[in-house]
Amino acid sequence: MKALSQKRRHPLAAIALLLMGLLLTGGLYAVATTVNQAKADTTSFSASDVEEGGKLFAANCATCHGMGASGTQDGPSLVGVGAAAVDFQVGTGRMPMQMSGPQAQQKPAQFNAEQTKQLAAYVASLGAGPAIPEEHLLDGKGDAANGGELFRVNCAMCHNAAAAGGALTRGKFAPALAGVSAEHIYEAMVTGPQNMPVFSDSNVTPEDKRDIITFLKTIEANGSPGGADLGALGPVSEGLFVWVAGLGVIIAFTIWLTSRTS
Amino acid sequence: MGNHSDGSPNHSGTVATAGQNEVEKFQDPGLPPHRLRLADTDPVAAKRAERQVAILFGTSVIGTLVFLVAYFAIDLGDDTSIATIRTQNLLLGLGTAFAMLGIGTGIVHWAKALMPDHEVSEERHAIRTEEDRQAAVRIVDDIVDETGIKRRPLIRNTLLGAVALAPLPALAIFGDLGPRPDNALAHTMWAPEGDKLKRLTRDPDGTPIKASDVTIGSAFHVIPEGLNELHEGKLNEKAKAVVLLMRLDPDSLNPSEGRENWSYNGIVAYSKICTHVGCPVALYEQQTHHLLCPCHQSTFDLTQECKVIFGPASRPLPQLPIAVDAEGYLVATSDFREPVGPSYWERDEHERLINS
């Protein structure tokens, strides 16, 4: 303790204190969010799930989606969207929507896994729709090469060939796919959230979806050993880098070549 | 330095002021005083510069070693991952860069810091003298005279004829670069073969699509039946024939006269090739029903038959007329009714031909 009190006026003490504080709050936050996202068994719903979900729905969602999820002017009807749509929208924090805008943005999830499951159970009970995918389709052990080809045909024009995301019209955008869970990727494909088209099982089979997820997880795990990928956005960021850094180096060399040594 | 502006009015390079006999003279400032470098006076600095040059050359040696180690130590087999190949590429690039950069910067630093730096001025010599000009004229005259081209018109004329004809074989060779496209741009694989209508199939595997497969909000990337079986010119055909298939609420479609039966239950098919410069327009927003071209942001409204609502494209995307065959699969009832893709010289003529 004595050593500690002696060093408390050290010039670096403030910085050390700040770092400790940041680590502590960050750590607590990380623990809290992982607790929130811990996966519950979401494939089977009990009657109490439906009942609890109905209460949560009436309290949190009915303002826009209407009582009984029949839709109002502010929000679409949710009859028949299925459990997958709820698990995606609520699980990624897009719903409940924070504010209206070009599209609902991802944010920390407002409901924990148990509540998300109950909401999904309630909405699924209103009408048949895509269910939450089975575990074996999300294991990332499919054919990455086939997944890559399907991704380039069906997904790459909006989500970018490296899945780095891209802009759409009037403020909308296709998000980057790194860090998105396999379950959410699968659910997005079957439900077509917001402006994303639906890729139903008759278009891209469940096995093909598994391959696409495998491809995405593979390129995510491979990282970028060739150096910084500059957002994988192509000519804009790479061009900017070359014009600024590349030409800067050339100019610096020119100045050095023609300068006198001291 | 030079003496070409010494002020004498008979020499070129004189700067004379109008109306005055006074000639303004440009004073030669001479060389600035020679400044000794640190390494010239201080042996410690010279030693330091010597070490720096050696370090730069040493960097080059290390760069070469990095290259060699990366080339031989990283074993590339059939099951090597892309990540390993890219790591090797990175190391090869860095090794070569430092190998070259070390030698280059080392030599420059050596020359700048240690080699003698006495300044030398070189006089500029006259650009052209009268004698040189005369000599050149004499040479040309001699050539004309000795060839006798003026006295022997037969030789002159046959030479002219030979030179004029010699490029003709090139015309034949350039002609072999390919057949003229003629009206190949106006037709695609969607045209029915006899009575057989072409089915719409999935890209890339070529399986046919049932109308019942296409749910509302879906987008299918479509190629014509038989494309995958082509042995030659597959990419050329694909580039013209790719189609995006979407299903919307039939009430939101507003077909114009003559196009009422080009869709089926709200399922529509449009060419994926942008009418601006031919990028694939496949960014479909299923709620706004907009199609966006990623290259120049041309935006097409699906509910208005892909009318351009933003961007540089000048025409709507061509629509593919579709129907359902006896087995429930989607088929194209005819080829596109206009040439797909960007404008070209004979496009209007081809469009008239298609619709006649």
Image (cartoon, rainbow, N blue to C red):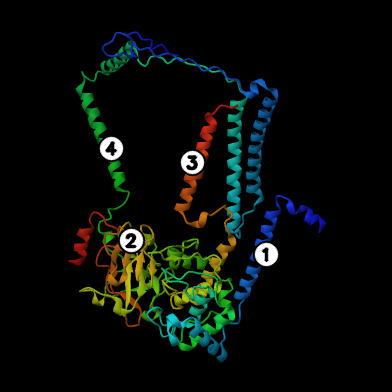
Q: Crowding near pointer 3: few (<14 within 10 Å), some, many (20+)?
A: few
Left or right? Give the position of A135 relative to B354: right
**Amino acid marked by disc 2:** Ser
**Gap in Å between the C-alphas at discs 3 and 4?**
44 Å
The residue at the point 26 percent across, 62 percent down is B315
Asked whether the beta carbons under mark 3 and mark 4 sit within 8 Å of each other, the answer is no
The residue at the point 67 percent across, 50 percent down is B73
Q: Whole-percent x and y of residue B24?
A: 35, 12
Looking at the rendered image, the disc whose residue lies closer to the viewer, 1 or 2, is: 1
Q: Which numbered disc, 4 or 2, marks the residue that appears first in the sequence?
A: 4
Do badges 3 and 1 share one subunit? yes
Q: Whole-percent x and y of residue B43?
A: 69, 23
**Gap in Å between the C-alphas at discs 4 and 1?**
82 Å
Q: Crowding near pointer 2: few (<14 within 10 Å), some, many (20+)?
A: many
Looking at the rendered image, the disc whose residue lies closer to the viewer, 3 or 4, is: 3
Asked whether the beta carbons under mark 2 and mark 3 sit within 8 Å of each other, the answer is no
Asked whether the beta carbons under mark 4 and mark 1 sit within 8 Å of each other, the answer is no
**Gap in Å between the C-alphas at discs 2 and 3?**
33 Å
The chain containing the residue under callout 4 comes to B
Q: Crowding near pointer 4: few (<14 within 10 Å), some, many (20+)?
A: few
- Mark 3 sits on what residue? A247
Do badges 4 and 1 share one subunit? no
Give residue A24's mark: 1
Looking at the rendered image, the disc whose residue lies closer to the viewer, 4 or 2, is: 2
Residue extending farthest left: B356
**Secondary-structure class at tag 2:** loop
